[in-house]
Amino acid sequence: MNTQTQLAKRDNGIVAPRSDEQGQKGPAVVPAVDIHEDAHGITLWADLPGVSRDRLNVHMQDGTLFIEAAASIETPASLRLHHAEIREPRFARAFSLSADFDTSKIEANLNDGVLKLSIPRREEARPRRIEVSVG
């Protein structure tokens, strides 16, 4: 990512408070992400272990990209659980996107607990070479 693009501001904590769609409040794990930027846009990978497509919510609002998800971790019936820190972890992360990106063309793919978001740069914001004539 270059210094001219402001993509994300991250809270330094690993757990952030949030409220889900039903208004329930509680801690949410901030998922780790990898971000790659090139002339065409940004590709973002977010680690969301145990998350299925139906429990994932990716949306844009007022220039902010939100990733919210809930994992489903099944405990085998033969296993007696004595202690569990988080039974159904929730994930939440938000990114501020600059106007250089075309948010209407974001592509999302979830595969084996990894969310891949492709965020293209607007055509007018892409770097281009300007030909210089002599004479």
Image (cartoon, rainbow, N blue to C red):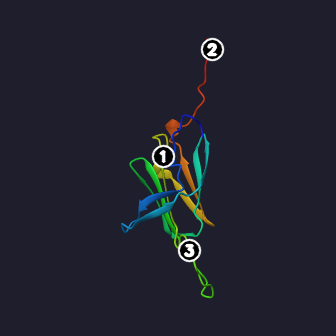
Q: Nearer the viewer, residue 36 or 23?
A: 23
Q: Position of residue 85 (x, y in %)?
A: 55, 70
User: Marks 1 and 3, how far apart in space?
Assistant: 42 Å
Q: Is residue 95 above or below residue 91?
A: above
Q: Which residue is mark 1?
A: 102
Looking at the rendered structure, the kind of residue marked 2 is: Val
| Crowdedness near tag 2: few (<14), some (14–19) or many (≥20) residues, C-alpha within 10 Å | few
In the image, residue 124 lies at what x, y percent?
Answer: 50, 36
Q: Are marks 3 and 2 in contact (CB under 8 Å)?
A: no
Relative image position of residue 3 (x, y in whole percent): 57, 35
Instruction: Name the amino acid, label 3.
Output: Ala
Q: Give the alpha-carbon distance from disc 1 to disc 2, as whole Å.
A: 36 Å
* Most foreground residue, 78 or 4: 78
Residue projecting furthest to the bottom: 78
> Where residue 96 sits in the image (x, y, percent)?
46, 46
In this figure, which residue is indicated by the disc labeled 3?
84
Q: Quadrant of the N terminus?
A: top right
The residue sitting at 60% across, 84% down in the picture is 80
- In the foreground, 52 or 70: 70
**Tag 1: amino acid:** Asp
In this view, the mark in front (1 or 3): 3
Q: Residue drawn 53% across and 43% down?
A: 121
Quadrant where the C terminus is found in the figure? top right
Where on the picture, by quarter, is residue 73?
bottom right
Helix, strand, or loop for circle 3?
Answer: loop
Residue linked to disc 2: 134
- Which one is nearer the viewer's eye here, 106 or 115? 115
Please give the name of the residue rendered at 39% of the width and 66% of the height, measured from the top-left corner. 21
